[in-house]
Amino acid sequence: MKTTLSPTPHDWREVRRFRAWELHLQGWSQQRIAEALGVSQGVISQWIHRALSGAADALRTHKAPGAPPRLRPEQLEQLLTMLDKGAESYGFKGDVWTCARVATLIERTWQVHYHRSHVSRLLHSQGWSPQRPVVKATQRDEPAIATWQAERLPALKKSH
């Protein structure tokens, strides 16, 4: 039977698990340990079982692994190369890479669907930031705007 796990706890839950292990080693019953720590006897049983079957790491806090990435590292590298070529070279109007466009490119190329907000996180992790297109009205009359700015705007500024 193991005698010590030499903990260096990272959070209060981990401290509680190591304390349960110490009390178990001192001969306390699972019921007494559960009462002392304010948890169920079933939890104590699981912690002791983990400590007996693993090592000190069995009682440590572990980050949840999450889902495996759907794009392999070489595919990410290929994506960055594709982005360098510009959006127009992949059939998009205007040379701006938005998250929605990158998501479309990924889906077309590898049949992997990503939500555009995840594409933003993916791009940031690779040192890229998505671009936001400048939105202008299609009916814009540039000559009329220039005339207004040259003639009417100065008159408005003088009156204030």
Image (cartoon, rainbow, N blue to C red):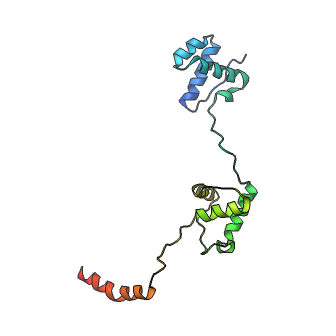
Residue at 61% x, 32% y is: 61
In the displayed structure, would residue 107 be above or below residue 152? above
Quarter in which the N terminus is drawn: top right
In the displayed structure, would residue 80 be above or below residue 46? below
Give the quadrant of residue 72.
bottom right
- Left or right, 69 with respect to 155, comes to right
Give the quadrant of residue 84.
bottom right
In the displayed structure, would residue 11 be above or below residue 104? above
Q: How many marks?
A: 0
Residue 38, x across and y down, in percent:
51, 19
Residue 13, x across and y down, in percent:
56, 28
Q: Looking at this view, is 1 or 126 the one in front?
A: 126
Residue 119, x across and y down, in percent:
61, 57
- Give the farthest residue toward the right: 74
Quarter in which the C terminus is drawn: bottom left
- Give the farthest residue toward the front: 139
- Give the farthest residue toward the left: 159
Residue 31, x across and y down, in percent:
57, 12
Give the quadrant of residue 95.
bottom right
In the displayed structure, would residue 10 be above or below residue 114? above
- Left or right, 148 with respect to 9, comes to left
Residue at 53% x, 19% y is: 37
